[in-house]
Amino acid sequence: MGISPKSEITFVRLPEISPDELTTHMSDPRVAEHMPLLTFQWDQEAVSRFVAAKEECWRRDGLGHWAILCNGDYVGWGGFQKEGDEWDYGLVLKPDRFGIGARISKKAIDFAVTDERIPFVTFLLPPSRKNLGALKRIGAIFVSEIDYEGAKFLKFRLDTL
């Protein structure tokens, strides 16, 4: 399901989304395919811990991950999470909405450009992700391969200043 140019993309906080909706989203094997850290079963308790951790980022850093809506419908979650001194951007969409990631990411990166706390954004992608053209098109550069919580990732950086 694509979106039209007139579709409205909005960012809201994760507690506004039904735990059942988040459980269904994160239990889809197509979502887990490119998420090497997703090694557990999603249930109500996992969703509760996830939302609490993301809300703690908002409390601690004043910014975190959003739930993403398209015309009011939940399509996924993503946003910025502080990792040390860096702001990492992540996006996890429902499988039937994978095609709208570029539009959502543009809106998020536009936000980062206007936020003086974010001089650059990092992206951590698993090596299973082969199509990296979108990162190159926006000007992100490859930094290195890193180990994060026991999994290998490709790290990219995009200056926002």
Image (cartoon, grey):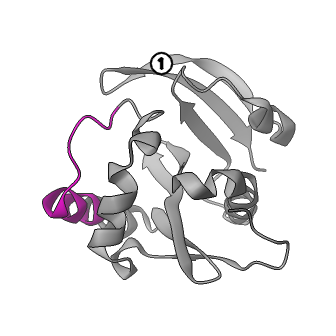
Residue 48 picture quarter: bottom left
- At x 54%, y 58%, the residue is 79
Magenta residues? 37-52
Which residue is denoted by mark 1 in the rendering? 146
Q: Is residue 87 rendered to the left or right of residue 132?
A: left
Quadrant housing the N terminus: bottom right
User: Magenta stretch containing residue 40, yes or no?
Assistant: yes
Give coordinates of residue 115: x percent, y percent.
67, 64
Would residue 112 be seen by someone viewing this image from the given angle?
Answer: yes
Mark 1 Cα shell of 10 Å, populated few (<14), some (14-19), many (≥20) = some
Give coordinates of residue 32: x percent, y percent.
40, 39
- At x 29%, y 65%, the residue is 51
Of 112 and 50, which appears nearest the observer? 50
Of 148 and 78, which appears nearest the observer? 78
Q: Is residue 145 rendered to the left or right of residue 84?
A: right
Q: Which secondary structure lies at badge 1?
A: strand
Of 122 and 129, which appears nearest the observer? 129
Residue type (three-letter) at the residue carrying disc 1: Ile
